[in-house]
Image (cartoon, rainbow, N blue to C red):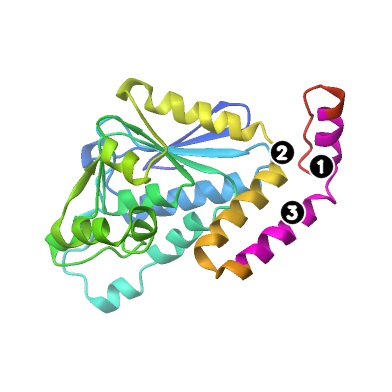
Amino acid sequence: MSENILIENPSNGVRLIRINRPDKLNALNEAALKEIASALNAAESDDSVRAVVVTGDARAFAAGADVSEMQGKSSVEMHSSKRPSYWETIRKFPKPLIAAVSGWCLGGGNELAMCADMIIASETARFGQPETNLAIMPGAGGTQRLTRAVGKAVTMEMVLAGRSLTAYEALILGLVNRVVPVELYLEKALELAALVASKAPLAIRQAKESVQKSFELPLEESLAVERTNYLLLFGSEDKDEGVAAFLEKRAPAWKGK
């Protein structure tokens, strides 16, 4: 049983993970991270799940790490924490992951949102990495993913000076996909997830991996990954079905094979 998250299946092919710590503004304690990682592992192994949405509530996606867990901790104790393994599971989730963000999205919350492939934000969303206010710094990708998303200058201001981004600033800078009224942010994220889930599963997974590699590898190597993934899909039953459905002007029936 999960104590810090809720899991739902709101539509065919889509799984919803809600962070459920409203009294803590959904701050990410170690138990919550473990449950999110476990839920993603379960979604990965479930062929009926083709896309996942992670969210909090209207007040907060996640207002950072649970600071109470840091009190009195030494470097050795933090080094032996299992948190990095949970973050690795989240980062390496191979299926499409969409973050539905409203309210505070700070510190570890922002790092979690940036692990997603797409972000739908409500007009009230605020994104930030304020860890230096506690004499620490981002430790789960905040200095790396944020730089790749919004550039060096803005990242430096967010990390060093504590600047937070409004939803529309995040949209302009390319951190989020779109901004919608607060009453629609989850609905729109679920709609996007359902659209992605309607596509051929193998093609979606290979395409996601190819885009991710563009951030991790030199251009020639990432182009080689793209070409390999492209060619592999020509051995799938879904490719034959997709081409046949297009030529016959009918809806395809994907098998994920």
**Mark 3 and mark 1: Cα distance apart in space:** 11 Å
Q: Label 3 belongs to which residue?
A: 230
| Percent coordinates x, y for residue 104 in the rendering | 24, 40
- Few, some or many C-alpha atoms within 10 Å of disc 2 (few <14, some 14-19, many ≥20)? many
Mark 2 vs mark 1: which is more N-terminal?
Answer: 2
Q: Mark 2 to mark 1: distance in Å? A: 8 Å
Up the image or down, 75 lies above or below 25; here it is below
Q: Circle 2 — which element?
A: loop
Q: Secondary structure at mark 3?
A: helix
**Chief SS of the magenta region:** helix
Q: Quadrant of residue 179?
A: top left
Mark 1 sits on what residue? 239
Residue 52 has which mark?
Answer: none
Label 1 residue SS: helix
Residue in the picture at 52% in, 26% down: 191
Residues rendered magenta in the picture: 222-246
At x 22%, y 37%, the residue is 23
Q: Which residue is mark 2?
A: 200
Amino acid at pointer 1: Lys
Q: Are marks 2 and 1 in contact (CB under 8 Å)?
A: yes
